[in-house]
Image (spheres, rainbow, N blue to C red):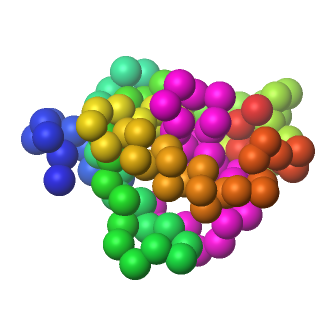
């Protein structure tokens, strides 16, 4: 559970590796995820992610910080997938490196990717 009780909890389940690839943000220091959702979040806000991953029995928990916000109606100038409202969360804290390594291991063969993602 979150170290800081003021962190907002975000639960996300990924059922396939293609969607995980489209959401993973390898260009963020320490790794991160783009989560399509109604924003209501602010840059710098602390969150706690509970992520269910394909091929993993236990969810991964990691603290994070909102480093990217895409509001509804944003253009698709940079993103190949169009206007995806949501937030980008940078992994933080003690469990950040473990979460990054676990995701990158699952995405072996897909990174660095050439396919479209929800971000850059």
The residue positioned 50% from the left and 67% from the top of the image is: 53
- Most extreme residue toward the left is 5
Q: Name which quarter of the figure residue 17 lies in.
A: bottom right
- Above or below for 105 versus 80: below
Residue 9, percent from left and from top: 27, 50
Q: Is residue 114 magenta?
A: no
Residue 12, percent from left and from top: 44, 61
Judge left or right: residue 85 versus residue 31.
right
Magenta stretch bounds: 11-39
Residue 5, percent from left and from top: 11, 41
The residue positioned 49% from the left and 31% from the top of the image is: 30
The residue positioned 49% from the left and 44% from the top of the image is: 100
* Quadrant of image for the C terminus: top right
Residue 62 visible, this angle: yes
- Above or below for 16 versus 9: below
- Most extreme residue toward the right is 114
Q: Is residue 31 magenta?
A: yes
Q: Name which quarter of the figure residue 94 lies in.
A: top left
Judge left or right: residue 119 versus residue 49.
right
Front-most of residues 75 and 67: 67
- Above or below for 85 versus 60: above
- Above or below for 110 versus 42: below
| Number of marks | 0
Judge left or right: residue 79 versus residue 68.
right
Front-most of residues 58 and 39: 58
Residue 19 visible, this angle: no
């Amino acid at each position: 559970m979150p170290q800081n009780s003021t962190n907002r909890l975000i639960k996300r389940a990924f059922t396939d590796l293609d969607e995980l690839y489209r959401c993973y943000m390898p260009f963020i220091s320490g790794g991160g995820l783009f989560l399509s959702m109604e924003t209501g979040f602010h840059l710098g806000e602390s969150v706690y992610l509970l992520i269910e991953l394909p091929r993993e029995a236990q969810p991964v928990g990691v603290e994070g910080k909102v480093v990217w916000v895409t509001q509804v109606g944003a253009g698709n100038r940079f993103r190949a997938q169009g206007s995806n409202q949501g937030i980008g969360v940078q992994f933080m804290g003690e469990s950040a490196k473990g979460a990054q390594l676990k995701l990158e291991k699952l995405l072996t063969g897909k990174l660095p990717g050439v396919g479209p993602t929800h971000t850059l």
